[in-house]
Amino acid sequence: MRRVLLLGFALVCAVLAYAQGHNTGVGGHEEHGESLAEKIFKLEKKNDKFNVYLNYSASFQTKDESGDWTSGFTNRDLRLEILGNITDKLSYRLRHQLNKSNVARSEDNFAKATDIMMLNYQFNEKVGVHGGKICLNWGGFEYDENPLYIYQYSDYVYWVDIFMAGAGVSYAPVKGQEFVVQVANTFNDRIAEEYGENAVGVDKDPATAQPLTASKSPLTYLINWNGSFFGGKLLTRWAWGIQTLAKHKNSKMLSLGQQLTLPHLQWYFDYMGAWEGLDHMRIASTEAATYFAEHGLENGYLNDVRYHSFITKLNWQFVPRWNLMLKGAYETVSAPKLEPFKNYRKSFLYAASMEYYPVKGQDFRLFLAYIGNKVDYSQRCGLEDYSRNRIELGFMYRLKCF
């Protein structure tokens, strides 16, 4: 009875969890030695039907966001992941964030806090199908990485919507090569909630803005290629997709990610681009809000917005239990039809961290990190340049609970 109560307590503790997971490498089902249940209760795990991961990160931060430095403790993230293989063909996966609202959205009837709730059926080694609330396979390695290890996302990956109700098919014609085709909702909510009542789209002149009309089928269609070459030393994550945003308003997205993977060094370079008939990420439309208000628009969104991002990251395990991380990103935003916002924004991200793994066999790391971000605007858009700086001292722990 005592063991049952202790096991129950451990599983309740797992509800304090964080894990990102299986797009391909985003913190899904790696092994990190014995689980907590095995260590405490000496329970021998005999199958792979039920796995619980607790990922948690916290830090002390000193940051400069408005010209003054402030300091304080923060909990960076908290998610629960439960996954397993029911049979050799059928598997499931649930991932839930514990620091987001649990209110169900109007379109998919899931809360934003529920990242993933999906089933996968693998017919054979080559063909599988999956469905539920899924992670869209947009490609790129920043996108694909466990957010536990991300100190700061690029603007592109931070703002793109990726967890949607949908379904997909995967096909691996040969070992090391996989293609994934997915169809999913474009939004978690209906367009009235996404863009608000009486929303209008703006082209060349705010005076000629036209009301947004909901599409009858706001869906996303994408194809993803995951490649592996030279024994896994060179990896690719490429994707192309089209999203229906509103009536006669579509978005096209391209991701080209490649990674060099060596025993003690990993380096990736991503290009990510979006050509949006209606501003879906809404960086440009948010920054144009004052301009719209000056022209009498209360709820305007830019048509024809272009986002381009170049992202690179290096991890180097220069001695055992130590890792040096260096990251940089260069991003541009342009609304070419509206002159004040044509090629108006450039963003620079730079980050570095030193990470130490004090416990052998555990994905537990202590870190000291610096993160900087600088945004430059063109003079004609009327926005002021700004920069942000942050220093963090903290820990990350991906704990296998069961």
Image: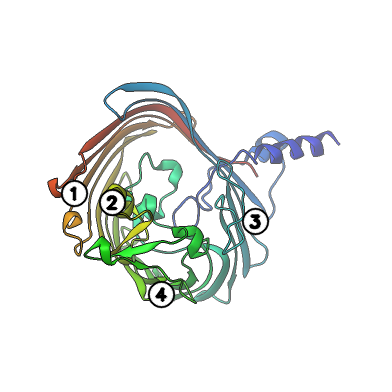
The amino acid type found where label 2 is placed reads Ala
Q: Given the current orientation, which residue lies at the most extreme right position?
A: 1
- How far across and how far down the image is residue 128, in percent? 54, 74
- Quote the CA–CA distance across marks 3 and 2: 51 Å
Instruction: Say few, some or many: other residues with alpha carbon within 10 Å of mark 3 (under 14 / 14 to 19 / 20 or more).
Output: few
Q: Is residue 85 left or right of residue 22?
A: right
The C terminus appears in which quarter of the rendering? Answer: top right
Using the rendered view, name the quadrant where residue 107 is placed: bottom right
Element carrying mark 4: loop
The N terminus appears in which quarter of the rendering? Answer: top right
Residue 288, numbered label: 2
Residue 247, numbered label: 4
- Quote the CA–CA distance across marks 1 and 2: 8 Å
- In-front residue for pair 163/44: 163
The amino acid type found where label 3 is placed reads Asp
Using the rendered view, name the quadrant where residue 388 is placed: top left
User: In the image, what residue occupies the spot 46% across and 74% down?
Assistant: 215
Instruction: Give the residue pinned by disc 3.
Output: 48
